Image: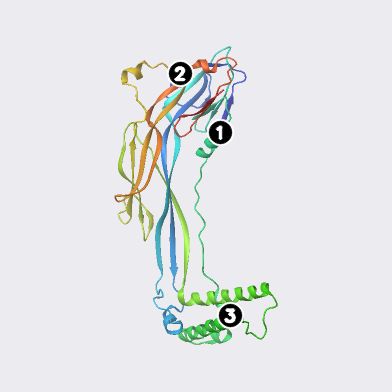
Amino acid sequence: MKKISLVLSSLCFFMCMSAQTIGFNPGVTANGVTYALPRTVLHADVSAIKTQFTPGEFARYAERYLHLEHVGQEAVTSYAVQQISLSLEGVPDTLKAYTIKLKDKSVAPMVTLTPSGIIVSVNSAQPKDVADIDNKVYRSAEGTHHQLDSRAYFTEEILSATSTAKMAELTAAEIYEIRETRNALMRGQLEAMPKDGAAMKLVLDRLNKQEESLMQLFIGWTDTIYLSESYRLEPRDYEDVPKTVLFRFSSKLGFVDADDLSGEPYYITVKDQHSVVLPSAKEAAKRKIEGIVYNLPSQAQVEILLGNTVLLTQTFPISQYGTIDQLAPALFGKDSTVRVTFHPATGGLLHLEQ
């Protein structure tokens, strides 16, 4: 996670805060250091797999020449959801923007902000767990391609065949010959046997590769492609999120738009667990901001559902469901060694130590 470390070496720190709600401009200003507390955004990262079956060129002859039943004759593409994971992100709440003002005879702290202006730490290096939270990147895995170069193993007789049926017949005969050679090799019945185990393995690997390549002409092959999508949800202040369509997914089309009824709906719900006691309106109005302000997020239960089946349940702290608190100015007086870190996605207090 990129960070902005503001060392106020030429200005002294004054622990008096002022709220700023218009024209949020994070960082060092004429008045001091301006920062914001975060609103919590939920991220649902969904991984899926696309499977593509391609029939072999000789698929219709598989039963006749190789006695294989139920061999696929048509190309088929299908999609399936593999995994859903939830994580948090913080976005600046400009209604919770504050300025650390300056005053003589106080400490000169290092204030660390994210690039968007969310406070991360005071007088403290950024901890690794905070960096991991804000720097999480999701990438699609590479697909796997399984088609082999079958024609590289065609004999002159196969290439000279004048019909597909004859080519299939000769290819099947070649497969049987490969199997007979391998069986004789395993039994030690070949006239020219490999000299040692390494040579034996090399010959077997070549025979197996040749058979697999030629078999693809009858049974086909399956390729896989890994896909991923990320969906975000920002709960409103003090409002649960009822059963809401997060995304839709089709077994034939993969990820589709939320209003595309060809896909099955995957739902999300968010329910505040009221783990934080909220101040009354009268108490909030009387609150005087004098220290470093931070969030007291409330725990919320998040569920992902397919229809009425719960696929995933997790509990997360959500800043919008909680309230704010502050660290007293006395903690940051002259000669203070207090070090503080905050969660960049919730604004909650992570560490406070001297």
| Distance CA(mark 3)–CA(mark 2) | 83 Å
Relative to 325, say whether 225 is above or below.
below
As shown in the figure, which amino acid type bears the numbered disc 1? Pro
Say which of 48 and 151 sits in front.
48
Query: Visible in this render: residue 178?
Result: yes
Side of 201 where 287 appears, left or right: left
Residue ID for mark 3: 182
Q: Residues within 10 Å of mark 2 (few under 14, many from 20)?
A: some
The earlier-in-sequence mark between 1 and 3 is 1
The earlier-in-sequence mark between 2 and 1 is 2
Residue 297: x and y in percent read: 40, 30
As shown in the figure, which amino acid type bears the numbered disc 3? Arg
| Distance CA(mark 1)–CA(mark 3) | 60 Å
Identity of the residue furthest to the top in this view: 105
As shown in the figure, which amino acid type bears the numbered disc 2? Ser
Q: Residues within 10 Å of mark 1 (few under 14, many from 20)?
A: some
Q: Residues within 10 Å of mark 3 (few under 14, many from 20)?
A: some
Side of 124 where 315 appears, left or right: left
Residue ID for mark 1: 127
| Distance CA(mark 2)–CA(mark 1) | 27 Å
Rendered residue at 43%/60% (across/down): 50
Residue ID for mark 2: 18
Rendered residue at 39%/62% (across/down): 78
Relative to 67, say whether 90 is above or below.
above
SS at mark 1 in the image:
loop
Disc 2, disc 1: CB below 8 Å? no
Residue 251: x and y in percent read: 36, 59
The image quarter in which residue 75 lies:
bottom left
Judge depth for marks 3 and 2 and give the one in front.
3
SS at mark 3 in the image:
helix
